[in-house]
């Protein structure tokens, strides 16, 4: 059977072109006029102040595209009896989701950027909660490090190159120090630190932690360092239970 290409009908082409022009106009209007006026968004029952966020980030939140992998894995594998240490808390969504939707009561968040901490606290207040949040960076050792500030809140990182050129000095703690300072014994580690996972000594993961949700960033740290992290956790008795879009769920008995 042979197929012969035919030119599009003029009327159909005209309708298609008009539709494309209309969609382009709608998109431009949305990002220039509609989204800048959006002040708050409710996602998965969590209310968020988005007044200071970019139109692009507001659009992702409105479409439900924010932290999809983390909240999916948390909902499926975490229980109300878990005790969580979250590193890279950003604007507080994952923590509020775990506490509001899953009923987790022991939850501590670590966030390096002081401006992001302020927004996290505001979002907790919007949801009637007070966060247990530490304004420090997770690093190889206790001390002080340079945090690269991104144009978007999720771009903050100890890794140079993925930022706006602005930096801030912040206090740092090792994973062992963070665990030691907790008021409870953690069973879950949630981590999204934009490439700084390469500096973490995963040998310091305590025996009490049975579940790890971590986003790995081979684009920042390279595949060799990414595979090394996976190997380190496997050697500690974890198995890769799930991987979705670069976010891994590790479990151990």
Image: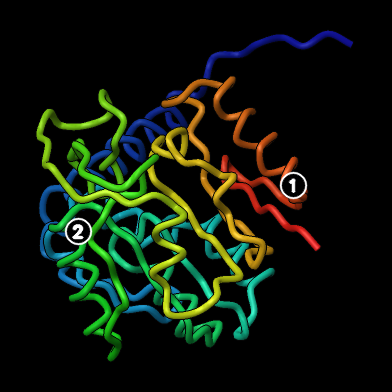
* Mark 2 or mark 1: whose residue is earlier in sequence: 2
Determine the residue positioned at 83% across, 8% down. Answer: 2
Where residue 106 appears, x then y in whole percent?
48, 82
Residue labelled with disc 2: 116
Q: Quadrant of the N terminus?
A: top right
Q: Quadrant of the C terminus?
A: bottom right
Determine the residue positioned at 56% across, 55% down. Answer: 69
Task: In this rendered view, identify the residue nearer to me: 240 or 62.
Answer: 240
Task: In this rendered view, identify the residue nearer to me: 135 or 165.
Answer: 135
Q: Specify whether 141 is left or right of 73.
A: left
Task: In this rendered view, identify the residue nearer to me: 250 or 93.
Answer: 250
Disc number placed over residue 240 in the picture, else none:
1
Q: Residues within 10 Å of mark 2 (few under 14, many from 20)?
A: some
Where residue 219 appears, x then y in whole percent?
46, 25
Figure colour scheme: rainbow
Compute the Cα span from label 2 to label 1: 31 Å
Determine the residue positioned at 51% across, 59% down. Answer: 190
Residue 13 image-quadrant placement: top left
């Amino acid at each position: 059977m042979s197929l012969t290409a035919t030119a599009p009908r003029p009327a159909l082409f005209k309708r298609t072109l008009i539709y494309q022009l209309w969609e382009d106009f709608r998109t431009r209007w949305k990002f220039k006029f509609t989204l800048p006026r959006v002040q708050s968004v409710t996602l998965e029952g969590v209310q968020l102040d988005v007044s200071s966020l970019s139109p692009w980030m507001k659009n992702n939140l409105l479409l439900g595209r924010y932290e999809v992998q983390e909240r999916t894995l948390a909902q499926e594998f975490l229980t109300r009896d878990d005790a969580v240490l979250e590193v890279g808390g950003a604007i507080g969504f994952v923590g509020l989701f775990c506490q509001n939707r899953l009923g987790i009561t022991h939850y501590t968040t670590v966030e390096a950027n002081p401006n992001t901490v302020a927004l996290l606290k505001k979002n907790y207040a919007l949801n009637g909660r007070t966060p247990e949040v530490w304004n420090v960076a997770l690093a190889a050792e206790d001390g002080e490090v340079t945090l690269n500030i991104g144009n978007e809140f999720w771009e903050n990182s100890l890794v140079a190159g993925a930022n706006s050129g602005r930096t801030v000095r912040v206090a740092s703690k090792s994973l062992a120090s963070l665990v030691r300072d907790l008021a409870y014994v953690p069973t879950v580690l949630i981590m999204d630190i934009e490439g700084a996972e390469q500096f973490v000594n995963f040998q310091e993961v305590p025996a009490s932690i049975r579940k790890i949700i971590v986003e790995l960033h081979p684009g920042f740290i390279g595949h060799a360092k990414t595979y090394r992290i996976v190997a380190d956790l496997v050697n500690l008795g974890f198995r890769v239970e799930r991987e979705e879009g670069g976010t891994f769920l590790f479990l151990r008995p």
